Image (cartoon, helix red, strand yellow):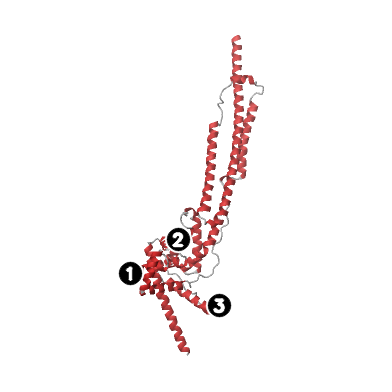
Amino acid sequence: MDCFNQLVARWERPIYALAYRTLGREEDARDVVQEAFLRAFRGLRGFRGDAKFSSWLYRITLNLCRDWIRRERRAPIAQMPEGVDPIDVADEHVSPAESVEDLVARQEMSSAVSRAMAELPEEQRMAILLKEYHGLTFQEIADQLNCPLSTVKTRLYQGLSVLRRRLERRQAEEASLRRATWESSS
Amino acid sequence: MCTERDRLIDYVYNECDASERDRMQRHLDTCDECRSEVTSLRSVREDLLAWDVPAHESVWRPFAPAPVTVWWRQVPAWAMAAAAGLVILSGAAGGVAVQAFMPAQQTAQQATTGNVAATATPVTAADLSAAEQRWLATLHEQVGAVDARVDRASIRTQPASFVPDSHDALVGELVTLRGQNIELLNVINNIYKNLDGIRDENDTKIGDIKAQLKNLQSFVASQLQLK
């Protein structure tokens, strides 16, 4: 079991990141990660040595996330908690290498990306998560999601295209807001 | 729409071979539409990097390692001691009974006529051999189970960096277990030897008594004839 604890220590961060980005809420991600490792431990006997341990763990986590989304019957939450100002958050995390303005911009972009991702269909969102944040190959994603290779590429392409339109729209809205603010102040 | 668009995703994620990549590069030099598409896809991929995961504490509470129990360790020590004592006592009791009920003055010269098999022997050599085989089979199963555990727990499920410690520990456990098995077999063998010795001794004495009874019977018959 000591070995299993070491495996958990090694994979906890990426598994948590996957669960968090899929579900959008820290408490839910914690519950799913805890359950994923418990299931992995119970299922060790059934684990085939010819597969990668990480792939197996990703599959367990993704299945749990899917179950969670279906059980809750709602889209992932992907918003800055109410009453939390990105500038306050940035103040707490500012480092000498990054200005407060840059950090605020990054926080806002992070929030915008999470919102845009949350609005994507589940299949597209999972394909993008596995590709962009976990570096899986097209084939590995196809194995994880039980779909053909061509479907993975289509989901990725369509998902990225939708994200691009939403993020561009957001940038256009921000630009017009800045212009309006500048005009009213001058 | 350009017919090469479907291949752009392979190019953007660099999941195409070198020749395909070169071909796509040449196409992009001439196709504004695809070049613009690639730029947009790369831009949105860059935006995705901004999505942070908040810092969090570990959500996993490590297991405490469970002790490995082999079958005979699950039997209480008092029960093991009682079982061993019972075996030894039964052997000793057999010897004592023989000593108590058989006349001590029987002579060895009559033994030559008493080569009669003991009819009351509770355990035969075949029984002992079969029992020993059963013991060995059980012990081999136990060792095999540990072998399988070593393989499953420390090789197939662990990355290479985790193998040495756990593997060494399990191999050490296996060696200890085998040592204990051998020790246990030696104890069993000694008990069997003691039983064999007692049985042989009993057989000899029973033969002596039967021979003496036969002589006595002949003697009584001859006396009756004389009268």
Q: Using the numbered discs, state the Cα–Cα distance from disc 3 to disc 2 in whole angstroms.
A: 37 Å
Q: Residues within 10 Å of mark 3 (few under 14, many from 20)?
A: some
**Where is residue A166 shown, x and y percent of the image?**
41, 75
Which chain does tag 3 point to?
A
What residue is disc 3 on?
Answer: A91
B134 vs B202: above or below: below
Q: Using the numbered discs, state the Cα–Cα distance from disc 1 to disc 2 in whole angstroms.
A: 34 Å
**Front in this rendered view, residue B63 or B94:** B63
Q: Residues within 10 Å of mark 2 (few under 14, many from 20)?
A: some
Which chain does tag 2 point to?
A
Which label's residue is closer to the chain start, 3 or 2? 2
Q: Residue at x 59, y 15 (%)?
A: B218
What residue is disc 1 on?
Answer: B3
User: The residue under label 1 is which amino acid type?
Assistant: Thr
Q: Residue at x 64, y 21 (%)?
A: B108
**Front in this rendered view, residue A32 or B46:** B46
Q: Which mark is residue A59?
A: 2
Q: In the displayed structure, does residue B28 sit left or right of residue B148?
A: left
Q: In the displayed structure, does residue B219 sit left or right of residue A12?
A: right
Q: Using the numbered discs, state the Cα–Cα distance from disc 3 to disc 1 in whole angstroms.
A: 49 Å
A129 vs B175: above or below: below
A170 vs B79: above or below: below
Q: Residues within 10 Å of mark 1 (few under 14, many from 20)?
A: few
